[in-house]
Amino acid sequence: VVAIAAGQAHSVALRADGTVVAWGSSEYGQTSVSFLGTKVIAIAAGYYHTLALRSDHTVVSWGSQDSVPSSATNVVAIAGGFEHSVALKDDGTVLAWGDNTFGQTNVPAAATNIVAIATEWYHSAALRNDGTVIAWGSNYFSVTNVPGSLSNGVGVADGEDFSVVTVRSGLPVFGRQLASAVVHLSSPARLNACFQGSYPLACQWYHDGAAILDATNSYLVLNSAQPPDTG
């Protein structure tokens, strides 16, 4: 097992071979893993639904929310709320769908250059690459009133009626530790780096200690992963 997630009364695990296991309450089918739930590289759980991010960077959903918009492509991160879902795309934009009773799928226009997302209950939060945070949806307990002094964020998480941001200042740091990717032979692979620090920032990807030519974005794309790419 390489990743786990939990909903209101169900649990989900991602195996190293890209398959998904789910257990617990299945009142809405949230533990009945979709036949499309293969070659999975990331998982998330809403209250009554489950999300899986596949190696082709498309999203699969099952349970109370089993539909995914066709625009959910080139996705690099996923999150599940009460009855809505949020996805981060590789261009730094955010997509949300599902229940919109409290505006939780109305992604603000300012949600650009996003490097991390979080959602819970009826609200969502997004961390921008300048360390600032945007929040939207239900404002119960003022959860979407982001403090104006908040900056240099490197990580974001949501609870039922609160949000938490990890703040770091000074030299560049990784907001999310790089982890091994589950990639199938000859399949496309995308590695993403979330880092924060004083601007301007520069990025360079390396392989076995050598700089990769033209790999200066916050993400690295391998069109056809092969054994020599490991390391």
Image (spheres, rainbow, N blue to C red):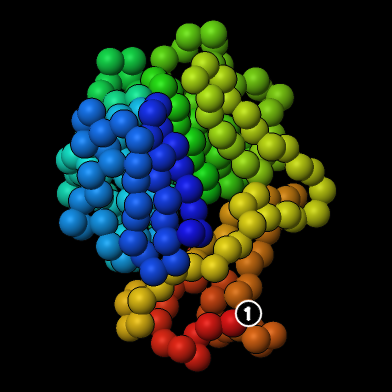
Which residue is at 63% across, 79% downward?
206
Instruction: Point out residue 87 in the picture as x, y percentages from the top left corner.
Output: 36, 44
Please state which of residues 25 and 40 is positioned toward the viewer in this rendering. 25
Q: What's the residue at 35%, 35% (across, down)?
A: 24
Q: Position of residue 56 (x, y in %)?
A: 30, 65
Residue at far bottom of view: 228
Q: In this view, does 192 lie to the left or right of 108?
A: right
Q: Quadrant of residue 194?
A: bottom right
Closer to us: 88 or 27 = 27
Return the residue at label 1.
Answer: 206
Quarter of the image with the C terminus is: bottom right
Q: Can residue 94 be seen in this view?
A: no
Frontmost residue, 218 versus 181: 181
For disc 1, the neighbor class at 10 Å (few under 14, some 14 to 19, many from 20) is few
Q: Quadrant of residue 104?
A: top left
| 158 lies above or below 142 | below
Which residue type does callout 1 highlight? Tyr
Residue appearing at x 62%, y 29% in the figure: 164
Q: In this view, does 74 lie above or below 113?
A: below
Asked if 98 appears above or below 207 in the picture, the reply is above
Tell me the residue at 53%/83% (across/down).
Answer: 230
How many callouts does the rendering have? Answer: 1
Tell me if residue 227 can be seen. yes
Q: In which quarter of the image is residue 36?
A: bottom left
Secondary element under disc 1, as helix, strand or loop, is strand
Could you say where residue 166 lies in the image, as x and y percent from the top left?
69, 37
Q: Nearer the viewer, residue 215 or 188?
A: 188
- Residue lying at the far front in this picture: please name it: 24
Q: Residue furthest right?
A: 170
Residue 187 place in picture, x, y as percent: 32, 77
